Amino acid sequence: MLKPGTYKGRIESAGFTDPQPGKAQQVAVTMACTDDGNLGETMTWFGGMKPGKNVEITIETLIKLGFKGATLTELASGAKMLDTTTEFPFKVADETWTDNSGQSRTTTKIVSIGAGGSLKMMDPLKASTTIPSYTGEIMQARQKLGVTQPKPNGQW
């Protein structure tokens, strides 16, 4: 497991978590470390889907990672919707939180671009019917970040 610090890595996989009932869907982008000494170790960054600042940060992060889609649901197609050839920096930190029983817990996770493990990912058809498209938010984020609009079907 990666310790707190800054690393470089490439995108290994991407999509939406398919949560248990009562849990929120999230964007998940798994980074594979390319730094010597940690080569191949992975961690997953989770982006929130709650409308407002939460989804704004998620969309801006995806655009910085080369998101090629015009709607968020296109990410269900996987890592091919992001730039998988570029090495991106990502920061890992310890985060302390209190669980439902009042116990203090610490988790090591990606805090700026991406906590790892095996996730059940949502299939594209289910994503197209359950994930909002956020088309307007994606267009606003592209303008804010000065990123060119992709052509249809994720082509640049």
Image (cartoon, grey):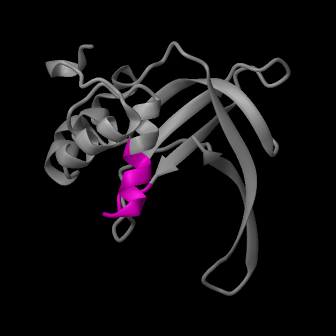
**What residue span does the magenta drawing correspond to?**
48-59
Task: From the viewer's perspective, tell me whether residue 141 is left or right of residue 120.
Answer: left
Front residue of 141/70: it is 141
Q: Quadrant of the N terminus?
A: top right
Instruction: Judge whether residue 114 can be spotted in this image.
Output: no
> Is residue 9 one of those drawn in magenta?
no
Front residue of 124/136: it is 136
Image coordinates for residue 117, horizontal then vertical, percent: 59, 43
Q: Residue at x 60, y 83 (%)?
A: 100
Q: Residue at x 16, y 43 (%)?
A: 128
Front residue of 78/55: it is 55
Q: How many marks?
A: 0
Residue that lies at the very extreme toward the right in this rendered image:
37
Task: From the viewer's perspective, tell me whether residue 12 is left or right of residue 149.
Answer: right
Quarter of the view holding residue 15: top left
Q: Is residue 104 above or below residue 4?
A: below
Task: From the viewer's perspective, tell me whether residue 23 is left or right of residue 104.
Answer: left
Image coordinates for residue 2, horizontal then vertical, percent: 77, 39
> Is residue 50 one of those drawn in magenta?
yes
Image coordinates for residue 116, horizontal then vertical, percent: 62, 43
Task: From the viewer's perspective, tell me whether residue 130 is left or right of residue 148.
Answer: left
Quarter of the view holding residue 143: top left
Q: Residue at x 30, y 24 (%)?
A: 68
Image coordinates for residue 31, horizontal then vertical, percent: 59, 30
